Image (tube, grey):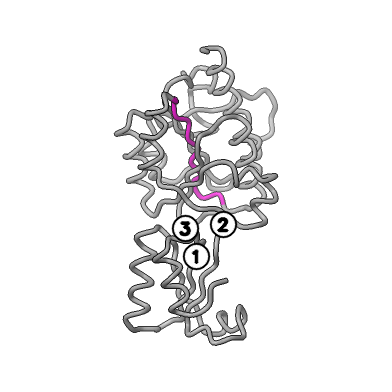
């Protein structure tokens, strides 16, 4: 934890990896405003909380502000895309839409790193934190694969499309199967939460919806298992191409 206004401001100015910032409700002042502005620029979520929550987190003089650091440094998708193209790499991105379970997040990251995804993209809200528990569950994969965070999901999808990356949404009721997709082209795969599925923005802005072929009667697969199956198909196709 980073405790106190000045400490948090300096960390934000230096670009230290921060997972979230807690600010006491009704706290004003120039320092608070600067914290909000810096956090917004870096896509760091800020939560207004009662002073009792801050008191539980720290017994010291927190001055109404506490930040939780992240074990990894978030990267910018806008920088990563041209970097991959310049290397001659065909991008394969994984977007997690509303996946809040830390165990699923860690399992997904583990499959993504093993099966060749180039980055994981998560929203600032409604997402599992990149915490020490997530890193542990991922067997350290979150330390080896870039993680990008966005506070504008719709704009992120548009950025991918403008850079020639086709967006696929995993949806159990889709008509097209994953084996019928050309994964050798630049691609981004969106996975939604098991209970809610893909969000409205993801459904509207995906170029195509795809599904895993099933022969059994169980309604759906665990999202981390589904991730591994789809990424395996992408890796298989890319391996055959080379």
Q: Nearer the viewer, residue 9 or 142?
A: 9
| 216 inside magenta stretch | no
Which residue is found at the position 50% from the left and 46% from the top? 147
**Which residues fall within the magenta stretch?**
89-99
Q: Residue 129, which numbered label?
A: 2
Number of callouts in the render?
3
Q: Residue furthest left?
A: 162
Q: Which residue is mark 3?
A: 125
* Mark 2 and mark 1 residues within 8 Å of each other at the beta carbon: yes
- What is the CA distance from the residue labelled 1 to the residue labelled 3? 10 Å
Distance from the alpha carbon under mark 3 to that under mark 2: 9 Å
Residue drawn at the location 61% of the way across and 25% of the way down:
232
Q: Splitting the image into 4 quarters, where does residue 205 fall? A: top left
Looking at marks 1 and 3 on the same chain, the residue that comes earlier in the sequence is marked by 1
Q: Secondary structure at mark 1?
A: strand
**Dot 2 lies on which element?**
loop
């Amino acid at each position: 934890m980073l405790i106190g206004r000045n400490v948090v401001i300096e960390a934000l100015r230096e670009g230290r990896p921060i997972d979230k910032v807690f600010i006491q409700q009704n706290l004003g002042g120039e320092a608070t405003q600067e914290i909000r502005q810096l956090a917004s620029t870096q896509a760091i979520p800020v939560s207004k909380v009662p002073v009792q929550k801050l008191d539980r987190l720290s017994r010291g003089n927190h001055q109404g502000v506490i930040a939780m650091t992240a074990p990894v440094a978030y990267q910018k998708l806008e920088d990563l895309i041209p970097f991959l193209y310049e290397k001659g790499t065909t991008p394969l991105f994984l977007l997690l839409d509303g996946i809040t379970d830390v165990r699923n997040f860690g399992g997904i990251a583990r499959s993504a790193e093993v099966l060749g995804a180039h980055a994981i993209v998560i929203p600032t809200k409604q997402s599992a934190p990149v915490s020490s528990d997530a890193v542990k569950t991922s067997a350290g994969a979150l330390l080896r694969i870039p993680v990008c965070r966005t506070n504008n999901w719709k704009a992120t999808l548009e950025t991918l499309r403008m850079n020639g990356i086709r967006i696929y949404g995993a949806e159990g009721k889709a008509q097209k199967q994953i084996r019928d997709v050309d994964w050798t082209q630049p691609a981004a795969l969106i996975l939604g939460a098991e209970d809610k599925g893909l969000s409205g923005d993801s459904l509207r802005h995906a170029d195509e919806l795809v599904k895993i072929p099933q022969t059994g009667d169980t309604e759906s697969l665990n999202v981390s298992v589904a991730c591994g199956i789809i990424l395996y198909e992408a890796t298989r196709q890319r391996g055959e191409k080379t």
